[in-house]
Image (cartoon, rainbow, N blue to C red):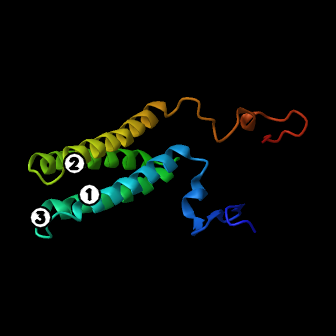
């Protein structure tokens, strides 16, 4: 089997199977999930330079982990969990962005790192807003209208 070939278990790459490939049909979830992973990694790399006694180090990391957990609720596209996850993510993004402002103005992070992270967290938030606005538009029904029609020949419900 080709190491980069798709199989029934997901996409296989040189490092093994990519679990995110199971959700490849939900492009919005995959985009937000991958971006969240990258931003959490960036937060960890950035806070590696903070002193271990600096509360912002641990708070930013904690919020980043909560953001990743909230992101997992987005995979439930047909439940209220998705809306709750979107709202929770937006709140966490606001809190992380505010703490990044504090870190920047207190001299803990550079202007460049601050502006990149702020922009990227903003992109996730915009993506969530876009997804919320588009709910209900163009979504196909789970049950076709034919489901409710009676078949005249058999008097059974047609699927």
Residue 105, quarter of picture? top left
Residue 137, quarter of picture? top right
Estimate the x, y position of residue 133 in percent, counting from the top left: 44, 31
Q: Which residue is mark 2?
A: 95
Considering the numbered disc 1 on the image, is that residue within a helix, a strand or a loop? Answer: helix
Residue 43 sits above or below residue 80 on the image: below
Name the front one of labels 3 and 2. Answer: 3
Residue 59 sits above or below residue 86 on the image: below
Considering the numbered disc 2 on the image, is that residue within a helix, a strand or a loop? Answer: helix
Taking the spot 76% from the left edge, 33% from the top edge, the residue there is 149
Q: Which residue is mark 3?
A: 54
Estimate the x, y position of residue 40 in percent, counting from the top left: 34, 57
Estimate the x, y position of residue 157 in percent, counting from the top left: 78, 41
Horizontal arrangement in the rendering, residue 119 relative to residue 7 (left or right): left
Name the front one of labels 3 and 1. Answer: 3
Q: Is residue 84 visible?
A: yes
Taking the spot 29% from the left edge, 61% from the top edge, the residue there is 45
Q: Which is more N-terminal, label 1 or label 3?
A: 3
Q: Which residue is mark 1?
A: 63
Horizontal arrangement in the rendering, residue 115 relative to residue 41 (left or right): left
Q: Is residue 66 visible?
A: no
């Amino acid at each position: 089997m080709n190491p980069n070939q798709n199989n029934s278990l997901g996409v296989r790459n040189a490092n093994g199977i990519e679990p995110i490939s199971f959700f490849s049909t939900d492009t919005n979830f995959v985009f937000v999930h991958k971006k969240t992973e990258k931003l959490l990694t960036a937060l960890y790399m950035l806070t590696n330079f903070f002193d271990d006694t600096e509360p912002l180090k641990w708070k930013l990391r904690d919020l980043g982990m909560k953001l990743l957990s909230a992101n997992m609720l987005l995979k439930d596209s047909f439940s209220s969990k998705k809306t709750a996850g979107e709202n929770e993510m937006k709140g966490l993004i606001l809190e992380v962005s505010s703490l990044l402002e504090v870190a920047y103005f207190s001299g803990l992070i550079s202007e460049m790192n601050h502006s990149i992270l702020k922009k990227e967290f903003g992109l996730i938030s915009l993506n969530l807003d876009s997804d919320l606005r588009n709910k209900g538009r163009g979504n196909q029904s789970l049950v076709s209208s034919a489901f409710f029609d009676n078949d005249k020949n058999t008097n059974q419900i047609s699927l």
